Structure formats: structure tokens, C-alpha cells
């Protein structure tokens, strides 16, 4: 068996049983691995109507066939569960080193089910798997628990939740290697609901490779392509993802003050260039990554911590009208320590600031906290982040995310969310293709599962007019399907800045054997995307939720290069459904399911085609 280990680890917390099951290789190859394999397993084992925080929800961690293999960026793993934030399928990805150790321990996938009566952590060392008491670690911040458990277990790699996950915040994250995060969808709360504080892994094995010499040759070739690419080889290594701050702002699609504006003349203060000049200590790379977009920065206190991504600089920066790098670095560190999704956390504070601006939130509601909700108050922004992590004072309501916060005031039109998940740092009114990927995304507001910023802003693989509509739905479908492929392989999507479909086929086949062609691999991505859609439909998430906030559909951008534009979703959505082979209600047609090898799900959803 090449690429795959052939083993699935199942841990039942209720009855404290640990079982190792054989991997169904045919299914694994059909759905590639990681995201695809996890989604297939989850939809077959879990009722889509399950309460995400109930004992009946399951928590899956899946590696890909290329995770820990000798290929660039092969350090990724995927969390699959039902999201307590959105009610959709949750697919949350992370890098670093932890996923490679799970793969090296011999497991393609880990299924956690049931619920422990008391706090526990899991320890995995190859064939040795234990459920251990975690009472002494419950309540600890991520850095502290990571250091303690790593010390106890001979420098093992640690995945954990912080206090936000323990307190079941629907915007809580899973942290690994201190500052890497499976951030979106509230997956930390699912682990918290099961009373699991951490998963500690020591793995000593290696991935079996079908053609070692070919794999070496392919790896060298792909690394060289990435290193010679202007984005993957220069922009990201030099400035990290923060290189995007000025680029996105200059295109007039950098949201300010909760999407009330889309351009600021202060962007340079929080740009990648400013971060590099004022805060950067060193670059930091995930496993086998030639890009090294990670940052280590120094706080005002002198403490060195993981640095912010572009989306974090935006959410705690422009979105809150804050342009103080030290404060943004501090808020990012707090999110890592407490286990909060930085996009949702910062965007929720921005939403609260607008609710306060418009008189929905009253002074008396926040008086006891001693903090303001004024735009640009950097100190308050940092302290609100901490209160969210602790679920303290008004932070209790912020910890629920922006949609639920707005529901308290019957003002959901101010929640910049899709399917209740906060939108990231790109205004879709000025990027029409990217907007359709927001609206139809299977996990709610998300940029990363169909990054149309590549062609519409960066010109990768070709430059598209960001305001044009023609061909955008078909282009978005390809990006959705290709991202599903990359996630399922166990690679980083930043490889798309240099690599294309044929490159991913080369890497898979060199490691796993001659199995996929470009056509069949992209179809596997379509299969995965469609299966996620089936789960959502069965969970009650219909086409009425394939939409954007009213502001983005009806209120034109008020300033900057894209002034005057709205998103034209009503013109794009029917075509997107059509190119996917779905009916006008966004339900996959029976013939589409047959073509994708998903016949077993015919009848579980009812299309009109």
C-alpha cells in the first residue's frame, strides 16, 4: 500500500474503547483522502440533523495520501465534523508538523465518538494509544498545555483546544504546534463538548512510496516551480500572507468598518511591508514547505509569538478601523492562546462596533466591562478579544459570533456572514467570481475553498476582469473542485500560486502509483464538493442560504477604485447551479450523481431534473 497507511483509529470516549480498523482503500482512493475521505466517512456515520455539540456528533481528523510524503507542503490534515456555528459540514484544515506525526504513527484517519465524563487527552505513539486524564490541563492556554504535554511525552507534537473551546464558543479553533490552527466553523467547541483537551502524537514510521526515484524527481521539479514563482517564491516568503494588504486595498476590495467601506488610505500601516519592518523576528515554515509564509513577531513586551495572517491583520485592523500593528499582534496571540478563529473573532468585534454606532448596543450593556465599542479603539479591541476567549462580561455574547450577536438585536443585516460564518477580508462587490464562491461555499463564509482572488486579482493562472460576469461560475466550480483535490491530498493550497492540476497528478501518482489522470482527479474534487452539498441539504441547508449579506447585494461600494458596484449574485447563481449539474434549487441531479459515482445517495435528496 503506497501513500496510505491502511489503518483507521477509532476512539469511543463513552465506553473508553480504542479500535484500529482497516482502511477501505477503494473508498480512500475514490475520495483521495483527508477532506474527501473524512467527509465520506462522516456522512455515512452521522445523522445530518445531529446537534453539533451532542454526544452523537463525531469528530474526524484525516490525513491525505501525500501527508508526510516527500512532496512540498505535505504537512496538512483536515478536521471534519458538523459545525456548531453554521449547522453545515465543517471542513477545517491546518498545517505545521502535527498532521505528519499522526500519519507517521500509522493512521490515515482518526474518528472520535461519544463523550468523556471528565476532561481527557489522547496519547498516540505508533500502535500505543491511550485515553489519559486531563483535569490538571483543563483551563490552560494553548501554549502552556502544549509545553507541558510535550515535556511529559518526549517532545511529542500537541493538538489542543483553549478555554474558548472548553466553553463551547462556536467560533473556537483547534490549535496545533502552538500557533497553527484548524480555525473555522467552531471545531474547537466540538472537541470541547467531548471533554477532550488535547491529542498528543509521537509517530516513528514513514510513508511508503510507489516510485522513490520518481518521487524525488517530481518533488525537486515542483519545489523549483514554486521557488521561481513571483508569489510563492518571493512575495509570500518575504512578507507572508500580509503581502496582500496593499494589493487588495489598491484593488478597492479591502473591507473597512464591517464592510461599510472598501478602501483605506491607512492600509500601509498594517501591511506586510510594515509588519516586516516593525515586528518580524523570523520566517516560519510548515513541514516540507519551500514557501515559508509563517511569521514569528515580537510583541511590545518583547515576547516572541506567531504572527498574523492577512485575514487577521484585516479583521482586527481595517475591519475595526484599527491601524496599530502591536495591538493586532497582541489580539492574534490571544486568539492562539484561547483558541479562537481570528477571522470570526475580529469580524465579530467589528460587527459589535457597528451595532454600537447605530445605537443597538447601549452604553449600559458594556459599562461593567469598562471598555468602549468605538471604531479605532485598539486597546478595547485587544481586551474584547480576551473577554471572548474567557466568555466574560459582554464577551459572552461576542463569543457566539457576529450573526448570533446581531440576532440579539433583531439586526442580522449587519452580520457580514454566509450561513452564519463571518466573511473574510475581500469585498465581493468588487470581485464578482470570488463573491459566488462565498455564496455557495459548503462551510459558509470562506475564501480558502475556492480562491478566485488568484485569477481576479493576482492573475494566476490568468488575469480575469474582476468585475466581469462571463464565465465566472464555471471558473469558480473549477477552483472549488481543485481546492477539494489539494485538501484531500494533504497539501497546502498556496501551491496553486505555481502548480496546476497536472502537477498534483504527478505528485499523487509518484507516491501512490498510477491511479489518476488530470480528468479523473478533478472529477474526484467534484465528487467531494457534491457530497458535502448532499450533507448540507440533508441537514436542512437549502439554496436560500446560498446568498450574501443584503449590504453586499444592494448597497454599492462607497469609496475607492470599485466605488458604485454591488455583487450581482442573482445573475451568477443560476449559472453556477447549471454548470454543476444541479437543478434550479441547487440540488444535484440524479444523472450528476451517477456520473460522479454517488449513486447510493440518489433518493436521499430530491432534485427536479
Image: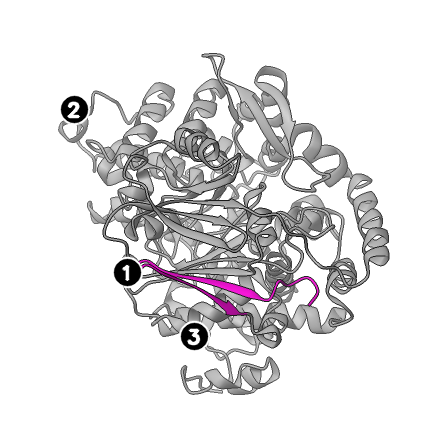
Circle on res. 446: none
Q: Which residue is mark 2?
A: 367
- Whether residue 468 sits left or right of residue 339 in the image: it is right
Q: Which residue is mark 1?
A: 14
Q: Position of residue 154 (x, y in %)?
A: 52, 35
Along the line of sight, which residue is nearer the eye, 337 or 226? 337
Of mark 1 and mark 2, the one earlier in the sequence is 1
Magenta span covers which residues?
1-22
Name of the residue lying farthest toward the left:
364
Along the line of sight, which residue is nearer the eye, 69 or 52? 69
Q: Which residue is mark 3?
A: 44
Q: CA distance from mark 2 to mark 3?
A: 49 Å
Task: Find out whether residue 9 is within the magenta segment.
Answer: yes
User: Which mark is nearer the camera, 1 or 3?
Assistant: 1
The colour scheme is one colour
Q: CA distance from mark 1 to mark 2?
A: 43 Å
Q: Position of residue 50 (x, y in %)?
A: 29, 67
Task: Find out whether residue 218 is within the magenta segment.
Answer: no
Of mark 2 and mark 3, the one earlier in the sequence is 3
Q: Is residue 307 above or below residue 399?
A: above
Secondary structure state at the residue bearing disc 1: loop
Residue beneath the point at 58% across and 41% down: 96
Q: Are marks 1 and 2 in contact (CB under 8 Å)?
A: no
Amino acid at each position: 500500500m503506497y501513500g496510505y497507511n491502511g489503518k483507521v483509529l477509532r476512539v469511543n470516549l463513552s465506553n473508553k474503547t480504542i479500535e484500529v480498523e482497516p482502511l477501505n482503500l477503494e473508498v480512500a482512493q475514490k475520495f483521495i483522502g483527508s477532506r474527501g475521505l473524512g467527509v465520506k466517512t462522516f456522512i455515512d456515520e452521522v445523522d445530518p440533523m445531529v446537534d453539533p455539540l451532542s454526544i452523537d456528533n463525531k469528530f474526524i481528523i484525516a490525513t491525505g495520501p501525500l501527508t508526510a510524503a516527500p512532496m512540498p507542503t505535505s504537512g496538512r490534515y483536515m478536521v471534519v465534523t458538523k459545525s456548531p456555528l453554521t449547522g453545515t459540514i465543517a471542513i477545517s484544515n491546518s498545517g505545521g508538523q502535527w498532521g505528519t506525526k499522526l500519519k507517521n504513527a500509522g493512521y490515515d484517519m482518526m474518528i472520535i465518538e461519544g463523550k468523556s465524563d471528565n476532561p481527557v487527552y489522547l496519547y498516540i505513539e505508533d500502535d500505543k494509544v491511550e485515553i489519559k486524564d486531563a483535569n490538571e490541563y483543563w483551563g490552560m492556554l494553548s501554549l502552556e498545555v502544549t509545553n507541558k504535554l510535550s515535556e511529559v511525552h518526549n517532545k511529542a507534537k500537541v493538538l489542543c483546544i483553549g478555554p474558548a473551546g472548553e466553553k463551547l464558543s462556536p467560533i473556537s479553533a483547534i490549535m496545533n504546534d502552538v500557533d497553527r490552527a484548524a480555525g473555522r466553523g467552531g471545531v474547537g467547541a466540538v472537541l470541547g463538548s467531548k471533554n477532550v483537551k488535547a491529542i498528543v502524537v509521537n509517530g516513528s514510521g514513514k510513508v511508503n512510496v510507489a516510485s522513490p526515484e520518481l518521487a524525488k524527481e517530481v518533488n525537486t521539479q515542483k519545489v523549483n516551480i514554486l521557488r521561481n514563482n513571483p508569489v510563492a517564491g518571493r512575495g509570500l516568503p518575504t512578507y507572508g500572507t500580509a503581502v496582500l494588504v496593499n494589493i487588495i486595498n489598491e484593488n478597492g476590495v479591502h473591507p473597512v468598518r464591517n464592510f461599510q467601506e472598501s478602501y483605506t488610505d491607512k492600509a500601509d500601516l498594517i501591511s506586510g511591508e510594515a509588519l516586516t519592518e516593525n515586528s518580524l523576528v523570523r520566517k516560519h515554515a510548515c513541514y516540507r514547505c519551500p514557501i515559508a509564509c509563517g511569521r514569528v513577531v515580537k510583541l511590545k513586551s518583547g515576547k516572541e509569538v506567531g504572527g498574523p495572517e492577512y485575514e487577521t491583520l484585516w479583521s482586527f485592523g481595517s475591519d475595526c478601523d484599527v491601524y496599530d500593528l502591536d495591538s493586532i499582534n497582541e489580539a492574534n496571540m490571544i486568539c492562539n492562546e484561547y483558541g479562537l478563529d481570528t477571522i470570526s473573532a475580529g469580524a465579530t468585534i467589528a460587527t459589535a462596533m457597528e451595532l454600537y454606532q447605530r445605537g443597538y448596543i447601549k452604553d449600559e450593556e458594556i459599562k461593567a466591562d469598562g471598555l468602549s465599542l468605538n471604531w479605532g479603539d485598539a486597546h478595547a479591541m485587544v481586551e474584547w478579544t480576551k473577554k471572548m476567549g474567557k466568555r466574560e462580561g459582554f464577551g459572552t455574547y461576542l463569543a457566539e459570533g457576529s450573526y448570533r450577536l446581531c440576532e440579539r438585536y433583531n439586526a442580522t443585516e449587519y452580520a457580514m456572514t454566509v450561513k452564519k460564518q463571518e466573511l473574510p477580508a475581500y469585498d465581493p462587490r468588487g470581485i464578482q467570481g470570488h463573491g459566488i464562491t462565498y455564496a455557495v461555499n459548503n462551510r459558509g463564509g470562506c475564501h480558502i475553498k475556492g480562491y478566485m482572488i488568484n485569477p481576479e486579482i493576482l492573475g494566476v493562472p490568468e488575469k480575469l476582469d474582476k468585475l466581469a460576469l462571463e464565465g465566472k461560475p464555471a471558473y469558480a466550480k473549477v477552483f472549488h473542485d481543485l481546492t477539494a483535490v489539494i485538501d484531500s491530498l494533504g497539501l497546502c493550497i498556496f501551491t496553486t500560486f505555481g502548480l496546476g492540476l497536472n502537477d498534483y497528478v504527478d505528485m499523487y501518482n509518484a507516491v501512490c502509483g498510477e491511479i489518476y489522470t488530470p480528468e479523473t482527479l478533478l472529477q474526484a474534487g467534484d465528487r467531494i464538493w457534491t457530497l458535502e452539498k448532499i450533507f448540507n441539504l440533508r441537514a436542512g441547508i437549502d439554496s436560500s442560504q446560498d446568498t450574501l449579506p443584503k449590504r453586499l447585494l444592494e448597497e454599492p461600494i462607497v469609496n475607492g477604485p470599485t466605488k458604485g458596484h454591488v455583487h450581482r449574485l442573482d445573475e451568477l447563481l443560476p449559472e453556477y447551479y447549471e454548470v454543476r449539474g444541479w437543478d434550479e434549487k441547487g440540488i444535484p441531479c440524479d444523472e450528476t450523481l451517477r456520473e460522479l459515482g454517488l449513486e447510493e445517495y440518489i433518493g436521499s435528496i430530491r432534485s427536479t431534473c
